[in-house]
Amino acid sequence: MATGNEAQKPEDSEHEAAVPFTVSFNRSQSEVIVYGCLALGILFAAIGVFTGVHLLTLAAIAPIAMAYWHYPMIEKGKPQLGANEEGLYVERIGFIDWSAIRMTDVKRKTVRNIEQVRLDVLLTRPLDNALTRAQPFPFWKKYMKRNWKRSRREHGRELIAIDLHTLAADPDEILTRIRAFKFV
C-alpha cells in the first residue's frame, strides 16, 4: 500500500531532464604544449637574432606555429560543445537543429594505452541546411585546431566526429546530456 510520501515522488525514467550545458577544452592537457612551444620559439628567435644565425631565427617559426595551432585549447570562456533547446552547439559550426540529427554515438579507441573518445553525430541533411544558427568566427581562427572533423557518408549524409577526450567532462556524461534533448 502506498503512503502519501511515495505518491509524491517523481517516477524514475530512463532519460534525465534536458538541462543546457557547455564543455570547454581541458586546459591542463594543453598548457604545456602551447606555452612550451611559445617559449622555445621565442628562445630560438632571440638567440638567432643576437648571434646572427638566421637559420635559428627561421627555425623559430615551427614551435611558434605549433603554439598558434593549439591556442584554442587554452582559451578561457570558449565552449567547444554544448546543447540547449535550440540544438547541438559545436564551436566554429554553430547550433545544429535537433531534427537534423539522425544518430549520436560515442566511439572509443585505444592507442598505446591512451584512450581516444569521439562523439559521432550523423546528420539527416547537409550541414549547411542543418544549422539553426551558424557561428561566425574570425578568419585567423580558420587555421587553428578545431575539435571536430566533417566527412561525407553514404546517401549524401554528413558525419561530424567530435573529439571528447580533449574536453573537460566525462564522455559518457556528455552523451547522456545530449540524449536528454533528443534520444537518437
Image (spheres, grey):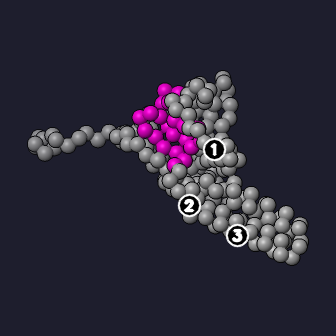
Structural distance between the alpha carbons of marks 3 and 1: 25 Å
Residue under label 2, please give it.
27
Secondary structure under tag 2 reads helix
Residue found 44% across the figure and 33% down from its top: 86
Structural distance between the alpha carbons of marks 2 and 3: 18 Å
Query: Which segment is the magenta one?
Result: 79-100
Find the residue positioned furthest to the bottom: 51
Disc marking residue 39 = 3
Residue 97 within the magenta-colored segment of the rendering: yes
Residue under label 1, please give it.
138
Residue 146 showing in the rendered view: yes
Q: Earlier in the sequence, mark 2 or mark 3?
A: 2
Around disc 2, counting alpha carbons within 10 Å, would you say few (fewer than 14), some (14 to 19), or many (20 or more)? some
Q: Earlier in the sequence, mark 3 or mark 1?
A: 3
Which label lies toward us, 2 or 3? 3
Please give left or right for residue 137 compared with residue 170 in the image: right
Secondary structure under tag 3 reads helix
Residue 105 position within the rendered picture, expressed as x and y whole percent measured from the top left = 54, 40
- State if disc 3 and disc 2 touch (CB < 8 Å): no
Residue 68 lies in quadrant: bottom right
